[in-house]
Image (cartoon, helix red, strand yellow):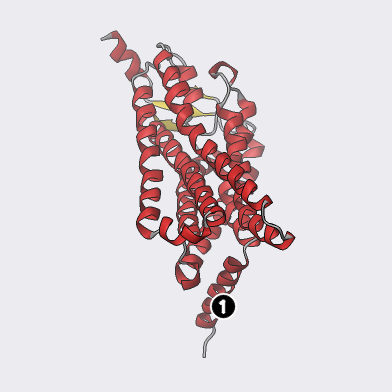
Amino acid sequence: MARVNQTSSVSEFILLGLSSQPEDQKPLFILFLTMYLITIIGNLLIILAIHSDPQLQTPMYFFLSFLSFTDICFTTTVVPRMLVNFLSKKTISYAGCLTQMYFIYALGNTDSCLLAVMAFDRYVAICDPFHYVTTMNRRCCVLLVAFSCSLPHFHSLVHTLLLNGLTFCDSNVIHHFLCDLSPLMKLSCSSTFVNEVVIISEGSVVLVTPFLCITLSYVRILIAVLKIPSAAGKRKAFSTCGSHLTVVTLFYGSIFYVYLQPLSTYSARDHIATIVYTVLSSMLNPFIYSLRNKDLKQSLRKLMGRWNSQATPS
């Protein structure tokens, strides 16, 4: 009974957020509201442009549209809660905290898997172009997306259930702006040994495996491109991968900085890296993919042109 009473004594957590200074709250609110609106509008435009243009009905854009949708959901899991904390209460219920953590890990790892799938798509397109259509057929694309969405949800469920089994009987103050595993495990007054073993084993596999797939794909792509005799051919091959490599570097660089370190070393210094992969990466993805892609820019111009013609009275 003592364990039950201890567990139930924590009904909510306090998210300290990015700053405790009252004068910082409104500027931070405006900053993150602006970033959130840009993220939503930018990714929605990417999705609409892809689905409205018959020329973009290819596997690469099919995966990109799902990445944009996931980015919208991922950012929505984090930013609205931050905005509430900036202007009003900084508390979040126990159930709400676990729910947020579940979706952060599920959607964040879905992003990771989709980036690996997109790297595989580029590998097939460049290294085996004659079999690209048959290899990346509609059924294969749907299965890859289904796997990229289902595995992360199972992974997230495991960690959420394990965290729910911990006892919280001391402090309920989370030194973060979101509910994350490391700061929550620091608050536990029961043993976190099983949680840490699962994070090191299963968690590392889920995090590192997509990155290794991306690395292997690009090593093979680099070898194939270097065999192309013409400089123009090399530039064309690399241009199709540049945007994806930029997104991968931004996303994985910040994630590895946060999660590939011992639990005891986790501190407030990791907040900036967390903002990069939860908010900034999702906001920049539409710009990165559209600015270096002529087909997508042309499709976006067509989309905006249709909207302008419909808005203009005849």
Q: Nearer the viewer, residue 177 or 90?
A: 177
Q: Is residue 169 visible?
A: no
Residue at the far top in the pictured view? 2
Q: Residues within 10 Å of mark 1 (few under 14, many from 20)?
A: few
Q: Residue furthest right?
A: 231
Q: Residue 56: x and y, percent?
A: 50, 67
* Element on which disc 1 rests: helix
Looking at the rendered structure, the kind of residue marked 1 is Gly
Residue 159 in picture, x, y percent from top left: 39, 27
At horizontal 50% and vertical 48% (from top left) the residue drawn is 120
Q: Is any atom of residue 296 visible in this view?
A: yes
Q: Residue furthest left?
A: 1
The count of marks equals 1
Percent across and percent down for residue 107 are: 44, 42
Which residue, given by chain and number where applicable, does mark 1 sit on?
A: 305
The residue at 63%/55% (across/down) is: 288
Residue 66 vertical position relative to residue 18 in the rendered view, above or below? below
Residue at image coords 58%, 68%: 295
In this rendering, the answer to whether 161 lies above or below 285 is: above
**Image position of 51 (left or right of 215):** left
Nearest the camera: 21 or 278? 278
Residue 175 position within the rendered picture, expressed as x and y whole percent measured from the top left? 55, 25
Establish if 150 lies above or below 311: above
Q: Nearer the viewer, residue 198 or 105?
A: 198
**Vertical comparison of 46 with 80: above or below:** below
> Can you say which quadrant of the picture contains the N terminus?
top left
